[in-house]
Image (cartoon, rainbow, N blue to C red):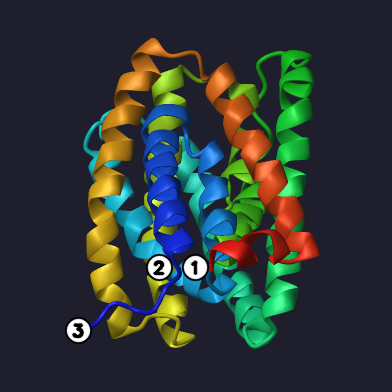
Amino acid sequence: MELPDYPTLFWITAALAIVIVGIAKAGFGSGPGLLATPLIALTIPVAEAAALLLPLLIVADLLTVRHYRHSFDRSNLSILLPGAMIGIVIGAFFFGYFSDNERVLEIGMGVLALLFVAFQSVRAIIFGALKRYRAPNSVGVALGAMAGFTSTLAHAGGPPAAVYLMPQQLPRHVFVGTTVVFFMSVNVVKLVPYSILGLFHLGNLLTILILCPFAFLGVRLGIGLNRRFDEKWFNIIIYSLLFLTGLQLLVGRSLFSLFS
C-alpha cells in the first residue's frame, strides 16, 4: 500500500486540523472543529478531504466519548438525532450531485466557513440576552436536520446544534458530553452515504493511520484545556484562521500553489 502523492502542505495542514478537531471535541463541544475540512481542502479536493477526515473524526469521537459517557442529556439527543438522520440523507444527495464540480464544493465550503465565523461573532450577544430557554421539540428536530446536512457536506454541524443547546444553559460538561455523543452518532451514520458515494479509497488508509496519533493528542489536550483554559482566546485564534481559510476557498488556491 502506497501513500497518495499529496503535497507537503497537506501533511502540515492535516496534522494541525486533526489536533484542532480533538481539542474542539473534547474541550469545547465541537465548534472550532469546523476549521478542519476547509483547511485540508486547501491542499486536496474537497470530497477527498471530507472522506479522509471522517474516520479520524470517529477516532476522536471514540476517544472523547469515554471521558463524557456519563455526562450527556438523553432527552436532547432523542430530539436532535432523528432530525440529523433526515439531514444526512439530504446532504448525501447534495454531495453526490455536486461531487464532480470541485469549484462548487469549494465555494460552498468557503461560504459555510464565513457563515460560521459570523455566527460565532454574534452568538455571545444573542445568547447573552436570552434567559434560560428550551425551544420546542419541532425546532430541535429542524436544527438537528440542519446539523446533519452541514455535517455531511463539511463536518460542520456544530452551529445548528449549538443554537438548540446553548440557550438551555446546560452545565459545561453536560453540553460538551451531549455534543460529543450526538456527533459520534452522526459521524458513524455518515459512513453509509460516504461509502455509497465511493468517497473512500484503500490508498487513503495509510494516510488515516499516520494521522490517527494527532487525534489522540488533540483529545488529550482538549480534556486538559476544558478544566484549565478560557476558550475565548482559543476561539479568537481558530475563528481568525477559519475566516482566512474561508476567503481562500472562495477566491481559489493561488496563495497555496506556491507550496504544492
Label 3 crowd bin: few (<14), some (14–19), many (20+), radius 10 Å: few
Q: Is residue 187 visible?
A: yes
> Looking at the picture, how far across and down is residue 124, in whole percent?
72, 20
Relative to 3, does residue 114 appear above or below in the rendering?
A: above
Quick one: SS at disc 1? helix
The disc at residue 71 is none
Compare marks 3 and 1 and give the one earlier in the sequence. Answer: 3
Residue at 62% over, 70% down: 91
Q: Which residue does the numbered mark 2 point to in the structure image?
A: 52
The residues tagged by marks 1 and 2 sit, at their Cα atoms, a distance apart of 5 Å
Callout 1–callout 2 Cβ contact below 8 Å: yes
Quadrant of the frame with the N terminus: bottom left
User: Where does residue 240 sit, x and y in percent of width and height?
Assistant: 67, 35
The disc, 3 or 2, on the residue closer to the chain's N-terminal end is: 3
Name which residue lies at 59% across and 57% down: 38
Residue 74 to residue 193: above or below: above
